[in-house]
Protein backbone atom coordinates (compact mmCIF):
# COMPACT_ATOMS: atom_id res chain seq x y z
CA UNK A 1 0.00 0.00 0.00
CA UNK A 2 1.38 3.38 -1.07
CA UNK A 3 1.87 5.83 1.80
CA UNK A 4 1.89 9.58 1.23
CA UNK A 5 3.98 12.09 3.13
CA UNK A 6 2.46 13.72 6.17
CA UNK A 7 2.25 17.50 6.50
CA UNK A 8 5.00 17.35 9.09
CA UNK A 9 7.29 15.48 6.66
CA UNK A 10 6.49 17.97 3.88
CA UNK A 11 7.23 20.89 6.20
CA UNK A 12 10.57 19.31 7.10
CA UNK A 13 11.31 18.88 3.38
CA UNK A 14 10.36 22.49 2.70
CA UNK A 15 12.76 23.60 5.45
CA UNK A 16 15.56 21.51 3.96
CA UNK A 17 15.50 18.85 6.69
CA UNK A 18 13.45 16.12 5.03
CA UNK A 19 14.50 12.47 5.11
CA UNK A 20 15.83 10.63 2.07
CA UNK A 21 12.60 8.66 1.82
CA UNK A 22 10.53 11.90 1.79
CA UNK A 23 12.68 13.44 -0.96
CA UNK A 24 12.48 10.26 -3.01
CA UNK A 25 8.74 9.89 -2.52
CA UNK A 26 7.94 13.52 -3.42
CA UNK A 27 9.99 13.24 -6.62
CA UNK A 28 7.83 10.26 -7.68
CA UNK A 29 4.36 11.10 -6.18
CA UNK A 30 2.34 13.74 -7.99
CA UNK A 31 -0.13 14.21 -5.05
CA UNK A 32 2.67 14.94 -2.58
CA UNK A 33 4.33 17.34 -5.07
CA UNK A 34 1.04 19.27 -5.36
CA UNK A 35 0.73 19.42 -1.57
CA UNK A 36 4.33 20.64 -1.22
CA UNK A 37 3.64 23.35 -3.82
CA UNK A 38 0.54 24.42 -1.85
CA UNK A 39 2.67 24.76 1.28
CA UNK A 40 5.12 27.00 -0.60
CA UNK A 41 2.21 29.11 -1.93
CA UNK A 42 0.71 29.49 1.55
CA UNK A 43 4.01 30.64 2.99
CA UNK A 44 4.46 33.12 0.14
CA UNK A 45 0.89 34.42 0.62
CA UNK A 46 1.46 34.85 4.36
CA UNK A 47 4.72 36.71 3.75
CA UNK A 48 2.91 39.01 1.30
CA UNK A 49 0.39 40.13 3.93
CA UNK A 50 0.93 43.68 5.16
CA UNK A 51 2.49 43.98 8.58
CA UNK A 52 0.38 45.55 11.30
CA UNK A 53 1.76 46.66 14.60
CA UNK A 54 -0.16 48.14 17.53
CA UNK A 55 0.29 51.82 18.28
CA UNK A 56 3.26 52.40 20.52
CA UNK A 57 1.56 54.46 23.19
CA UNK A 58 -2.16 53.92 23.81
CA UNK A 59 -2.00 55.05 27.43
CA UNK A 60 -3.09 58.68 26.78
CA UNK A 61 -6.27 57.48 25.05
CA UNK A 62 -7.02 54.94 27.79
CA UNK A 63 -6.33 57.53 30.51
CA UNK A 64 -8.59 60.09 28.79
CA UNK A 65 -11.46 57.57 28.63
CA UNK A 66 -10.96 56.67 32.30
CA UNK A 67 -10.92 60.32 33.43
CA UNK A 68 -14.05 61.03 31.36
CA UNK A 69 -15.97 58.09 32.84
CA UNK A 70 -14.96 59.07 36.39
CA UNK A 71 -16.03 62.68 35.75
CA UNK A 72 -19.43 61.53 34.47
CA UNK A 73 -19.90 59.28 37.52
CA UNK A 74 -19.07 62.21 39.84
CA UNK A 75 -21.59 64.46 38.07
CA UNK A 76 -24.26 61.76 38.33
CA UNK A 77 -23.64 61.32 42.05
CA UNK A 78 -23.72 65.09 42.56
CA UNK A 79 -27.00 65.38 40.62
CA UNK A 80 -28.63 62.61 42.64
CA UNK A 81 -27.37 64.18 45.86
CA UNK A 82 -28.76 67.59 44.88
CA UNK A 83 -32.09 66.06 44.00
CA UNK A 84 -32.26 64.12 47.28
CA UNK A 85 -31.53 67.34 49.18
CA UNK A 86 -34.26 69.19 47.27
CA UNK A 87 -36.71 66.37 47.97
CA UNK A 88 -35.81 66.46 51.67
CA UNK A 89 -36.38 70.24 51.78
CA UNK A 90 -39.72 69.82 50.02
CA UNK A 91 -40.69 67.12 52.50
CA UNK A 92 -39.79 69.29 55.49
CA UNK A 93 -41.56 72.34 54.10
CA UNK A 94 -44.68 70.31 53.36
CA UNK A 95 -44.60 68.66 56.78
CA UNK A 96 -44.34 72.08 58.48
CA UNK A 97 -47.66 73.21 57.13
CA UNK A 98 -47.06 74.73 53.73
CA UNK A 99 -50.41 73.20 52.91
CA UNK A 100 -52.32 76.47 53.24
CA UNK A 101 -55.98 77.00 53.91
CA UNK A 102 -58.49 74.73 52.28
CA UNK A 103 -56.11 71.78 51.81
CA UNK A 104 -57.59 68.59 53.21
CA UNK A 105 -55.28 67.13 55.89
CA UNK A 106 -55.51 63.68 54.33
CA UNK A 107 -54.20 64.99 51.00
CA UNK A 108 -51.29 66.72 52.74
CA UNK A 109 -50.49 63.48 54.59
CA UNK A 110 -50.71 61.53 51.33
CA UNK A 111 -48.21 63.88 49.66
CA UNK A 112 -45.88 63.54 52.65
CA UNK A 113 -46.11 59.74 52.40
CA UNK A 114 -45.41 59.87 48.66
CA UNK A 115 -42.37 62.07 49.26
CA UNK A 116 -41.02 59.62 51.84
CA UNK A 117 -41.61 56.70 49.48
CA UNK A 118 -39.83 58.60 46.73
CA UNK A 119 -36.81 59.17 48.98
CA UNK A 120 -36.72 55.47 49.92
CA UNK A 121 -36.73 54.54 46.24
CA UNK A 122 -33.90 57.05 45.68
CA UNK A 123 -31.84 55.26 48.36
CA UNK A 124 -32.51 51.85 46.81
CA UNK A 125 -31.63 53.17 43.37
CA UNK A 126 -28.38 54.68 44.64
CA UNK A 127 -27.37 51.32 46.14
CA UNK A 128 -28.17 49.45 42.93
CA UNK A 129 -26.36 52.00 40.76
CA UNK A 130 -23.22 51.81 42.94
CA UNK A 131 -22.69 48.23 41.76
CA UNK A 132 -20.45 48.19 38.71
CA UNK A 133 -21.97 46.11 35.95
CA UNK A 134 -22.53 46.07 32.24
CA UNK A 135 -25.97 47.12 31.03
CA UNK A 136 -27.68 45.85 27.91
CA UNK A 137 -28.51 48.47 25.26
CA UNK A 138 -32.25 47.92 25.58
CA UNK A 139 -32.06 48.38 29.35
CA UNK A 140 -30.06 51.60 28.98
CA UNK A 141 -32.72 52.97 26.61
CA UNK A 142 -35.49 52.17 29.12
CA UNK A 143 -33.50 53.72 31.99
CA UNK A 144 -32.84 56.91 30.02
CA UNK A 145 -36.52 57.19 29.09
CA UNK A 146 -37.63 56.73 32.71
CA UNK A 147 -35.05 59.24 33.98
CA UNK A 148 -36.22 61.80 31.39
CA UNK A 149 -39.84 61.35 32.48
CA UNK A 150 -38.84 61.70 36.14
CA UNK A 151 -36.97 64.92 35.32
CA UNK A 152 -40.10 66.34 33.68
CA UNK A 153 -42.21 65.40 36.70
CA UNK A 154 -39.62 67.04 38.98
CA UNK A 155 -39.89 70.27 37.00
CA UNK A 156 -43.66 70.16 37.39
CA UNK A 157 -43.39 69.50 41.14
CA UNK A 158 -40.89 72.33 41.64
CA UNK A 159 -43.04 74.74 39.61
CA UNK A 160 -46.24 73.88 41.48
CA UNK A 161 -44.59 74.13 44.89
CA UNK A 162 -43.14 77.50 43.97
CA UNK A 163 -46.28 78.94 42.38
CA UNK A 164 -49.06 77.39 44.45
CA UNK A 165 -47.37 77.27 47.84
CA UNK A 166 -49.80 74.59 48.99
CA UNK A 167 -50.77 71.00 48.33
CA UNK A 168 -53.14 70.60 45.41
CA UNK A 169 -54.63 67.59 43.68
CA UNK A 170 -52.28 68.20 40.75
CA UNK A 171 -49.24 68.26 43.03
CA UNK A 172 -50.37 65.04 44.71
CA UNK A 173 -50.83 63.43 41.27
CA UNK A 174 -47.33 64.51 40.21
CA UNK A 175 -45.86 62.91 43.35
CA UNK A 176 -47.81 59.73 42.62
CA UNK A 177 -46.44 59.69 39.07
CA UNK A 178 -42.91 60.26 40.37
CA UNK A 179 -43.15 57.33 42.80
CA UNK A 180 -44.52 55.10 40.03
CA UNK A 181 -41.69 56.05 37.66
CA UNK A 182 -39.06 55.65 40.40
CA UNK A 183 -40.45 52.21 41.19
CA UNK A 184 -40.21 51.24 37.51
CA UNK A 185 -36.63 52.53 37.40
CA UNK A 186 -35.62 50.49 40.46
CA UNK A 187 -37.30 47.37 39.05
CA UNK A 188 -35.46 47.86 35.73
CA UNK A 189 -32.10 48.15 37.50
CA UNK A 190 -32.73 45.17 39.78
CA UNK A 191 -33.99 43.01 36.89
CA UNK A 192 -30.86 43.89 34.88
CA UNK A 193 -28.63 43.01 37.85
CA UNK A 194 -30.29 39.61 38.26
CA UNK A 195 -30.11 38.99 34.49
CA UNK A 196 -26.38 39.76 34.41
CA UNK A 197 -25.81 37.57 37.47
CA UNK A 198 -27.18 34.44 35.76
Image (spheres, rainbow, N blue to C red):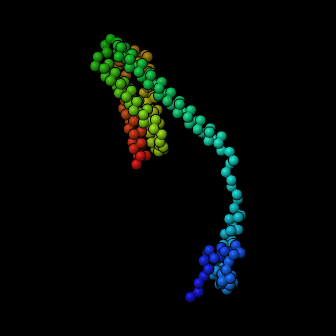
* Residue occupying image coordinates x 39% and y 36%: 186
Q: Is residue 63 left or right of residue 16?
A: left
* Residue occupying image coordinates x 60% and y 39%: 65
Q: Is residue 124 visible?
A: yes
Give residue 2's position: percent from left, percent from top.
59, 86
Please determine whether, in this image, residue 115 is positioned above or below residue 191: above
Q: Quadrant of residue 124?
A: top left
* Residue occupying image coordinates x 66% and y 74%: 12
Q: Quadrant of residue 164?
A: top left
Please determine whether, in this image, residue 8 is positioned above or below residue 111: below
The foreground one among 97 and 33 is 33
Q: How many numbered markers are drawn? A: 0
**Quadrant housing the N terminus:** bottom right
Please determine whether, in this image, residue 122 is positioned above or below residue 50: above
Give residue 128's position: percent from left, percent from top.
42, 36
Give residue 8's position: percent from left, percent from top.
62, 74
* Residue occupying image coordinates x 32% and y 11%: 101
Q: Residue furthest top?
A: 101
Q: Is residue 68 left or right of residue 148?
A: right
Q: Is residue 168 left or right of residue 6?
A: left
The foreground one among 104 and 196 is 196
Q: Is residue 38 visible?
A: no
Amino acid sequence: MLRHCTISELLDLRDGEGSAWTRSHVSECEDCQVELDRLHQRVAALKALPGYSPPRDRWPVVREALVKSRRQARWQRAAWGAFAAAAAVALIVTARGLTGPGTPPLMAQEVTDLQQESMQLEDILRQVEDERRVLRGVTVAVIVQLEDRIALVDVGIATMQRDEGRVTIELRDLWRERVTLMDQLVVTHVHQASYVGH
